[in-house]
Image: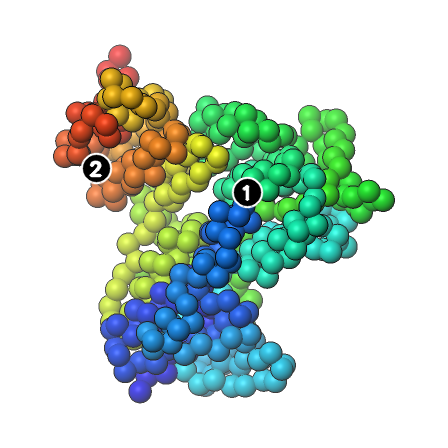
């Protein structure tokens, strides 16, 4: 019987184990989980914090019983320490601290990522008991909800990316006055500035204070709470808060892989091929700890996304069990809800294309989500990016109301990109239509046609 050991019990690890069992029911994957919470949706944490998902147990993609029934062996509160690739032995420590050597035929590394701790003076001296939080695990979540149970009145969030803005909404829902601080000149640095401005307006309209172009330099515990200092446009900034949340991104957790001599790639993440194989025979890797093949650019990049981790884990598990599956690559498709607004993107923007010496042109359009004569029509702002000479579709960004099916519309562009469509070919797509839900030319097609017309001027 093949011995498959998987390090990591989140998206990539669980997907690998489940797929391995489907490919070869004789395989009994052993999953090593560093904490006691396998297969929990980290992406769902803001909605538990907000109270929309009251029971944290609901964040589990599958229960422990589900995983047992699927044939996965779970070893919780177990940390992988080092790999001996020649002997094919993984050394681990359990909750009691005792070491154990686990033999394997195939090993999947799904160690994920760790939160970035920015160089802020005093940050390393403060923790959850002081009201200072990072947010990445269920343990982090419990610490944050414990702080919220003490009814803080004010909070500062450092980082205006996806998690930062989701948490701004979550804390606002809990009655906390929120200030978001972002070093970049805009929120959501993955969007073009005009679209990001729409998101910022939504935040401000909901009572969130937004400070862009602001660098936090220090934090200290004062007599009445936290004192946060920074710089904005050359001026000093001082903020007072009861709670501080630091969500400025993640970096790949590659410590275990490095001990085995695994090669690192883009973004100092684990280098893998299209079958999720590392440079060491028998060792695969997937998820937020690996680099990702960008389908459009044809290069590897560090793009940690939950949806990507599931796909990579599935490929790693199938191949580790003797199958043959290839990861098709990612386009960086993302979506976020910020109060009643949804922002989404896929593919490239002009600045992304320029960084690769690729010609591009972007046209911004507004279109209704359904026929205007039917009540409740919402405007969607859509930026389409294409190659000015070849008409190749390169990317799209959308911002609109949460009822405007923004997420599904970005998926149309993502599908077109996946299959190498031109901008003009988007108009050929046979999309559904009824006046309450769409138009004969859907909003995604209106935006594509506007891009083409702009190039003919």
200 to the left or right of 380: right
- Who is closer to the viewer here, 406 or 83? 406
- Who is closer to the viewer here, 54 or 415? 54
Q: Residue placed at 58% from the left, 84% from the top?
A: 99
Which image quadrant for residue 352? top left
36 to the left or right of 58: right
The Cα–Cα distance between marks 1 and 2, rounded to whole angstroms, is 38 Å
Instruction: Give yes or no for contact between labels 1 and 2 (Cβ–Cβ under 8 Å).
Output: no
Does residue 296 show up? yes
| Residue 141 on image: x %, y % | 58, 56
Query: Which residue is most to the top?
Result: 457
Q: Residue placed at 55% from the left, 49% from the top?
A: 49
Q: Residue placed at 47% from the left, 25% from the top?
A: 198
Label 1 or label 2, whichever lies nearer to me, is: 1
In the structure shown, which secondary structural element does the residue marked by tag 2 occupy?
A: loop
Query: Which residue is most to the right?
Result: 223
Q: Which residue is mark 1?
A: 170
């Amino acid at each position: 019987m093949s011995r498959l050991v998987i390090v990591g019990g989140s998206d990539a690890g669980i997907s690998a184990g489940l797929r391995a069992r489907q490919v070869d029911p004789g395989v009994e994957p052993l999953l090593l989980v560093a904490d006691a919470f396998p297969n929990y949706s980290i992406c769902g944490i803001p909605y538990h914090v907000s109270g929309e998902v009251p029971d944290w147990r609901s964040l589990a993609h599958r229960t422990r019983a589900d995983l047992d029934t699927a044939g996965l062996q779970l070893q919780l509160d177990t940390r992988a320490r080092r790999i001996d690739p020649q002997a094919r032995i993984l050394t681990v420590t359990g909750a009691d601290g005792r070491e154990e050597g686990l033999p394997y035929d195939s090993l999947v590394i799904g160690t994920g990522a760790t939160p970035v701790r920015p160089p802020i003076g005093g940050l390393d001296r403060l923790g959850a008991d002081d009201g200072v939080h990072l947010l990445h695990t269920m343990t982090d979540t419990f610490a944050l909800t414990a702080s919220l149970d003490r009814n803080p009145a004010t909070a500062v969030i450092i980082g205006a990316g996806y998690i930062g803005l989701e948490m701004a909404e979550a804390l606002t829902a809990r009655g906390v006055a929120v200030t978001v601080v972002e070093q970049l000149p805009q929120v959501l640095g993955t969007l073009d500035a005009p679209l990001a401005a729409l998101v910022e307006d939504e935040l401000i309209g909901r009572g969130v204070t937004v400070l862009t172009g602001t660098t936090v330099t220090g934090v200290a515990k004062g007599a009445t709470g936290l004192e946060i200092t920074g710089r904005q446009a050359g001026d000093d900034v001082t903020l007072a808060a009861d709670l501080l949340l630091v969500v400025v991104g993640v970096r790949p957790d590659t410590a275990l892989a490095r001990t085995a001599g695994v090669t690192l790639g883009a973004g100092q993440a684990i280098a893998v091929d299209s079958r999720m194989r590392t440079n060491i025979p028998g060792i695969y890797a997937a998820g937020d700890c690996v680099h990702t093949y960008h389908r459009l650019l044809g290069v590897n990049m560090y793009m940690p996304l939950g949806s990507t981790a599931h796909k990579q884990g599935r490929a790693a598990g199938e191949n580790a069990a003797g199958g043959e599956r290839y990861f098709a690559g990612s386009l960086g498709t993302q979506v976020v809800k910020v109060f009643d607004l949804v922002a989404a993107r896929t593919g490239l923007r002009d600045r992304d294309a320029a960084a690769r010496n690729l010609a591009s042109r972007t046209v911004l359009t507004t279109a209704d989500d359904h026929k205007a004569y039917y009540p409740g029509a919402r405007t969607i702002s859509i930026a389409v990016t294409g190659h000015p000479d070849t008409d190749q579709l390169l990317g799209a960004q959308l911002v609109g109301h949460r009822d405007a099916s923004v997420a599904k519309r970005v998926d149309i562009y993502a599908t077109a990109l996946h299959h190498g469509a031109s901008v003009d070919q988007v108009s050929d797509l046979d999309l559904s239509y009824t006046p309450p839900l769409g138009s004969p030319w859907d909003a995604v097609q209106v935006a594509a046609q506007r891009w083409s017309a702009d190039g003919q001027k």
